[in-house]
Image (tube, grey):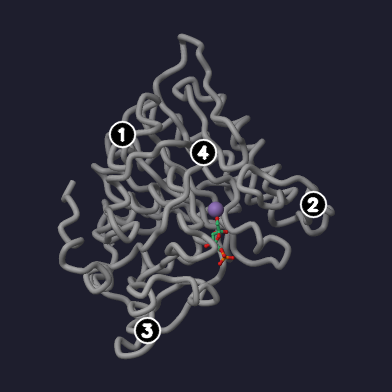
Amino acid sequence: MTDAAQRVEETTIPEYLALKGEPVEFRALVRQVTYAAKRVAAELRTAGLEGMLGATGETNVQGEHVQRLDDYANRTFVNNLLRSPAISDLVSEEMPEGLHLAHQDRGGYALLFDPIDGSSNLNVDMAVGSIFSVRHASDVLAAGHTQIAAGYVLYGPACVCVLAMPQNGVNVFTLDPSIGEFMFTRGPVRMPERGTTYGCNEANEPGWSPEVREFVHWLRGPSGHSTRYSGALVGDFHRILMEGGVYLYPADARHPQGKLRLLYEGAPLAFIAKIAGGRATSESEDILDILPSQIHQRVPLVVGSNEELERFLPSSRRNHRAH
Ligand code: F6P
Ligand code: MN
């Protein structure tokens, strides 16, 4: 290993961002995100021992049952993010309204996040995640290609933070619990042009469009893909990012707008996929071109490798704008 490679491999996220010339304010903001994620990771490890599993009895703005850990993670993210003076706006899956801090000393960043993605996995000890998007505060309802950065934390066998930055690519950092630091482990990541797996909820098939049905039949038939679906978007997306393939939650009869949320699920993952060389569509448009009209809006999502996406998109829809 060269000295330079050795240095990178022993690099924490703050050191990595400094080495790569990311601005100080952005580094401070990422520090607060990762600090919250470390707290959540620690809580997840012992929640079952402390009686912290199960539902609060409340439903969130999406009509979903709020888990105690959803609530804990949301408070943890909010409390930590508010410590960064660079952040003036917060949007969370768990908060019906966005939080705007009008204080004039506050900088112009907005953080949009899903504090615990895949919460139905919590009570059965399977992987869950947190997703985040960084925008200029003035761009909260702008198209996804205006995002400044995006990332997620996967709480799996290891706790992994993936951070996508237009100038510095998609990089993977793994939490070393012995020192409490996310260390650089891989990057910049290039999503393979084609993969061998796809992930979707096949129980929704009766409500899919003929195009989606035909595509999934192709995936599990002639193309020879295998199914991998954990029920947590972050985990299923992480596999696709690393190994290629396609994740889809299309519109169906029960979810005419799709199930996933644009601002803190679809757009950040589309941004990560794009920087890693993959693609994402809502079936009719590039996810990154969609102009949101409200913070909790849903979007159909098909995201993954170029070859699978080429196959999905009919020629009329293939000319998604290149950003
Ligand atoms: O955030 C929504 C979510 O929990 C994703 O993490 C996951 O991919 C999806 O919903 C699972 O939905 P379903 O249970 O309908 O397959
Ligand atoms: Mn989610």
Residue bearing the label numbered 4: 33
Q: Decide if residue 103 is in sight here.
A: yes
Q: Secondary structure at mark 2?
A: loop
Asked if the residue under mark 4 is in contact with the one under mark 2, i.e. CB atoms within 8 Å, the reply is: no
Q: Who comes first in sequence, dot 3 or dot 2? A: 2
Going 31% across and 43% down the picture, which residue do you hit?
A: 165
Residue bearing the label numbered 3: 217
Q: Is residue 71 left or right of residue 142?
A: right
Q: Is residue 18 left or right of residue 128?
A: left
Q: Who comes first in sequence, dot 2 or dot 1? A: 1
Closer to the camera in the image, 240 or 6: 240
Instruction: Please name which of the two marks, 3 or 2, marks the residue nearer to the observer.
Output: 3
Mark 2–mark 4 distance (CA, rounded to whole Å): 22 Å
Q: Which mark is residue 22?
A: 1
**Mark 3 crowdedness (10 Å alpha carbons): few <14, some 14-19, many ≥20:** few
Residue bearing the label numbered 2: 52
Mark 1 residue type: Glu
Mark 2 residue type: Met
